[in-house]
Image (spheres, helix red, strand yellow):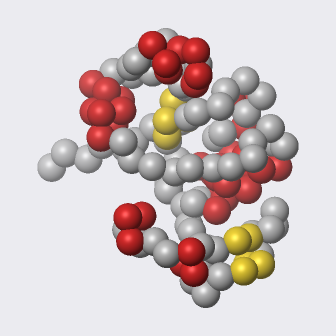
Amino acid sequence: MNKGDLLPEDLVFIDLKGRILEGIHKSSGERHVSQILYHAERYCSVIHCHPPAVLQWHFQREELADAAFYPETVTEVGPVPVVPYAEPLTEKLANNFEPFLAKYDTFIMQTMVWCP
């Protein structure tokens, strides 16, 4: 769904096991990542987005760990690690977050770039 078109009734609430508690739609395929973050008990919300400037930076560089796009990023977000690639919407991708959970608040998921 286009995030700009979402209405309150479009939200889906799931429990830590991925069962739908409330909502009329199926849960997102990204629920595996959300679940692993919530199980870490360090996170109280998950926002999944595709910011164009960050994606462009990622495609041009191997790591973002020391990158600071704005001064606020350093003080408010901190370092941003790149979580190794795994097939989207899978538990394997969620498990790739494990080494980063204790230290980081923001993540970039490594992208597999396909060029014909």
Q: Residue 17, position in %: x, y?
A: 81, 67
* Residue located at (49% from left, 40% from top): 109
- Residue 40 falls left or right of residue 93: right
Name which quarter of the figure residue 77 lies in. top right
Q: Residue 78, position in %: x, y?
A: 58, 19
Q: Residue 47, position in %: x, y?
A: 56, 50
Q: Residue 49, position in %: x, y?
A: 45, 49
Name which quarter of the figure residue 9 lies in. bottom right
- Residue 85 falls left or right of residue 91: left
46 or 7: nearer the viewer: 7
* Residue located at (67% from left, 54% from top): 34
Q: Is residue 80 above or below residue 14?
A: above
Name the quadrant of the N terminus: bottom left
Name which quarter of the figure residue 101 lies in. top right
Residue 57 visible in the shown view = yes
- Residue 64 falls left or right of residue 83: left
Q: Is residue 41 above or below residue 102?
A: below
Q: How many marks overall?
A: 0
Residue most toward the bottom? 24
* Residue located at (33% from left, 21% from top): 61
Residue 67 visible in the shown view = no
- Residue 101 falls left or right of residue 24: right
Residue most toward the left? 116
* Residue located at (52% from left, 51% from top): 48
Q: Is residue 71 above or below residue 98?
A: above
36 or 38: nearer the viewer: 38
Q: Is residue 88 above or below residue 56?
A: below
